[in-house]
Amino acid sequence: MDQGKRSITMPKGHSGLVTVGVKPKTQTNRIVKLKDFWDEGYKGQFEYVQAATRNYGFYMGGDKQWDARDIAILDEMKRMHLSLNIIFPIINLLTGYERQNGMDIKVFPKKGGLQPVAELLTELCKHVEDQSNAQYLRSAMFFDGIISTKGFVSLDIKYDDDPFNGEIVVDVEDPFDIVEDPQNKKYDMNYGKYVIKSYWGDKEQIKLIYPKSKQDIDNLKYDDLDNRDKTKIPGSDVSPDQFKCRVRETWWKHYEKATFLIDTINMSHTRVHKSKLDLLKVVLEKDRRRAEEEGRQPIFAVRENIIPVMNCTTTLGDIELEHIERPFGEMNKFPIIRFVPYYVNGNCLGVVDNLIDPQKEKNKRRSQSLNLLNSDVNSGFFNHETEGADRDELEAQATEPAPVINYKSVPPTKIQPTQLSVGHVKLEEMAELDATKISSVNQNMLAQGPTSESGVKDRQRINQGLIGSEIIFDNVGYSHKIYSETIVDLIRYNNTFSTAEMMAIASEAKLEQNVDQLLEAIRSRKIGKYGVELSASPTNPTIRFANFEMLLDMAKIYGEIIPPDIVIESSDLPKKEEILERLRQQAQMQAQLAQQQAQMQAQLAQQQQQQQQQPQPTQRRLAKR
């Protein structure tokens, strides 16, 4: 462990190392730098927060789909304001499709990498996902993204259950709590300078973790925080600062020059500390002389690179609670991964954004239609001022099913209301069709297409709708790739898996290679590079069904080559095991019957052969003569 650091149990988002004895001047300079990040980041976040809040409201429906001013006017006029949510099923369909078409991580070797190591890294990644229920968390990230335009998951090393090695965990983040570098115009946030994450921490816990800042934490009031941090706990109208405090983690990069010693034979590299540069010169000179004597090229080479270095600074207001350089070793990827459905030159766009106007049109046209129909029932009367009916009696009787209206000499005349026009109905229908066209989620995908169409035609329309949404799922794959590469780096640069754990995982995966060599290769970050490719998970319902259909078609063509038990095994039939057991019993009975028939045929053939070998009576008599 580095000098000046101590290991403790940390809250969400911390690595377990706390820097102590930092110089005040260094802290001051760092806070000044971070304030520049905060000001820039939160200004870039302002429009997103407004749009995302609106989008969540439109997904949830109800009065959240109406402007508060319009609701007040309609309530005063005693008119309806309906919300017929056409966004809800579109979002649910897309997130359902994503959940049924998940992806598996597969690590493959690149320069200097080894296939057995890649296979073990694949199993370790799957273990991390299984322990954190990452499949559900990634789906939650997708759900946030298609509604609010951004979804986030985070990776961290927690020491709660394993104080020595820690364990890699996955979590989903509230999109409103994450602020990224607005100057980064690439989809991958790792090209940016910083990522800011805020959360509500428990004051008691925070004071125990950072005892030197206890007095500052007690003295900090809710009103002392920057406006960007004045976020109340959802559902609460009171200040949370009695028990909670708003903690902010700023993940940021600085750059430094690094010298690497490269082994050209093993394709490995070692970073050389600046205090060892003199020793490096001696090693290079010895290698050069030996190469000249042996008539070969030198084994070692030196290269200087500018490399990014990750930092994590935790603050409460302007108070620095903690600063860690290289919180995850040499890993320089941000531990927060973002998903955006549509990303154009730094501009983020969700699915809901372009559906808001059709939704408003739908709500207004249906509400107007209902208000017109209501006015047809009770449209009012023209009543003579002196010779007509009593006004109070007329108002009381007007809403009755069979009113009896007494008048003096001039009968009241009912006002003929404006009739419901065809245009209202057409505009409402057009709004719903516009929503499906804009989102590429057509009526067939929503199971609302015409029933007279053939199954082939229906499937074609569904496929066309999926093609229109392909860009969304491409971005899902890109985010998943970044997320998977970050997990691999966390495994390689941090010893979170003990030897016993990795041996158990390797044994369960039936990896036949020498496990000790695998462990040594994984922990040697100097050797080899590894990439990640994604594949459709065979455990997903849609993939299983597609595979079953292909197997069924093959069984029809090739007959006995593909036996029935293999087809049934690939299906999702209820009582599948019982059917397979009966097939096995029938197969055993048929095998036994065939064996018995074969034995009987063999005995019969043997008897016939014996009879043929016995001499006939005439032959015996001739033999005697």
Image (spheres, rainbow, N blue to C red):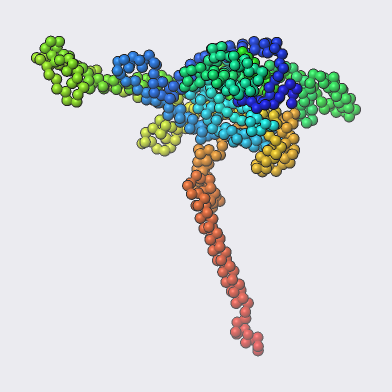
**Residue sitting farthest toward the bottom:** 625
The residue that appears at 47% across and 20% down in the rendered structure is: 236
Mark yes or no: residue 378 visible.
Answer: yes
Q: In the image, residue 213 lies at what x, y percent?
A: 64, 17
The reply, left or right, for residue 354 in relation to residue 185 is left
Residue 326 higher or lower than 495, as above or below: above
Residue 549 higher or lower than 364, as above or below: below
The residue that appears at 61% across and 76% down in the rendered structure is: 610
Q: In the image, residue 151 lies at what x, y percent?
A: 54, 24
Quadrant hosting residue 157: top right
Specify the quadrant that holds the C terminus.
Answer: bottom right
**How many marks do you count on the picture?**
0
Specify the quadrant that holds the N terminus.
Answer: top right
The reply, left or right, for residue 123 in relation to residue 135 is right
**Residue sitting farthest toward the right:** 293
Q: Nearer the viewer, residue 489 or 548?
A: 489
The residue that appears at 57% across and 26% down in the rendered structure is: 153
Quadrant hosting residue 305: top right
Mark yes or no: residue 487 visible.
Answer: no
Q: Nearer the viewer, residue 377 or 241?
A: 241
Q: Nearer the viewer, residue 255 or 261?
A: 255
Q: In the image, residue 413 lies at what x, y percent?
A: 15, 16
Quadrant hosting residue 378: top left
**Residue sitting farthest toward the left:** 409
Q: In the image, residue 143 lies at what x, y percent?
A: 50, 27
The residue that appears at 67% across and 31% down in the rendered structure is: 163
Residue 146 higher or lower than 221, as above or below: below
